[in-house]
Each structure stands twice: as structure tokens, then as C-alpha cells.
Image (tube, rainbow, N blue to C red):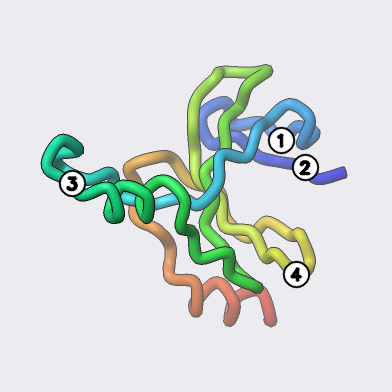
Amino acid sequence: MLLVYCPYCGTERAETEFACRGEAHVARPADPTDTTDEDWAVYLYMRSNTKGLYAERWRHIHGCGRNFNAVRDTVSDRFLKFYKVGEPMPDLDALVRDASK
């Protein structure tokens, strides 16, 4: 079982209390009505699906209900960083260096 930390509640809980919402930092088109069908499909469906460090959006569904971001290693399933929505994505290379110490 994964333990997930909610940066809003300040608590670490079982994964079953949360829902993964996919890749974080995906920018919504500024004017969806002026977006081509192809660009809209890319926004909706195309994700990087990286092997290794991956920034994800999570929601604390059985707690505060808020969305937050997390950096998770998809190989080991280990979380390296949790941060609030609106905060910049951490430097993934620096996280790798820090984790290897």
C-alpha cells in the first residue's frame, strides 16, 4: 500500500483515501472555442507517461477534497515530493540527486 501525504491537511494516509488524476502541469488551452479538434484531443488524451520521475495530480477524496501535486518514481512507486497546486514543479534532476544520497 502507498502512503500519500496531503500538503493541505498535513497528514499522511493510505492511498485508498486519494485518487490519482493523471499528469500534473498540463495547461488547458486559453480559448477552447478557438482550439482545433486535433489540439483539443492532444490536450485531453496525450500524456508523457514517463518511466522514472513523473509529476502527478492527486485529490484527497476522503479528506479535504483538494487537489495537489506529487512527484512519484514510476519504477519504484516511491513518492519524492508533495506540493500544492499553483506551486512550480520541482527540479526533477535535483530530486534524483537528493534521493541518491
Determine contact: label 1, label 2, CB under 8 Å: yes
Q: Which residue is mark 3?
A: 35
User: With respect to residue 99, does 48 lie above or below?
Assistant: above
Kindly identify which numbered label has been placed on residue 75: 4
Whole-percent x and y of residue 13? 75, 32
The amino acid type, in three-letter code, at marker 4 is Val
Q: Of marks 3 and 1, which one's residue comes earlier in the chain?
A: 1
Q: Of marks 3 and 4, which one's residue comes earlier in the chain?
A: 3
Which of the 4 quarters of the picture holds residue 61? top right
Q: Label 1, label 2: how many angstroms apart (C-alpha)?
A: 6 Å
The kind of secondary structure element at disc 2 is strand
The kind of secondary structure element at disc 1 is strand
Residue at image point 52% right, 57% down:
55
User: Mark 1 or mark 2, which is nearer to you?
Assistant: 2
> Among all residues in the image, which is located at the extreme front?
37
Whole-percent x and y of residue 1? 88, 43
The amino acid type, in three-letter code, at marker 3 is Thr
Determine contact: label 3, label 4, CB under 8 Å: no
Whole-percent x and y of residue 19? 65, 33
Q: Which residue is mark 2?
A: 3
Q: Label 3, label 2: how many angstroms apart (C-alpha)?
A: 39 Å
Total residue callouts: 4
The amino acid type, in three-letter code, at marker 1 is Glu
Q: Label 4, label 1: how many angstroms apart (C-alpha)?
A: 21 Å
Q: Label 3, label 1: how many angstroms apart (C-alpha)?
A: 40 Å
Whole-percent x and y of residue 56? 54, 50
Q: Which residue is mark 1?
A: 12
Residue at image point 15% right, 35% down:
33
The kind of secondary structure element at disc 4 is loop
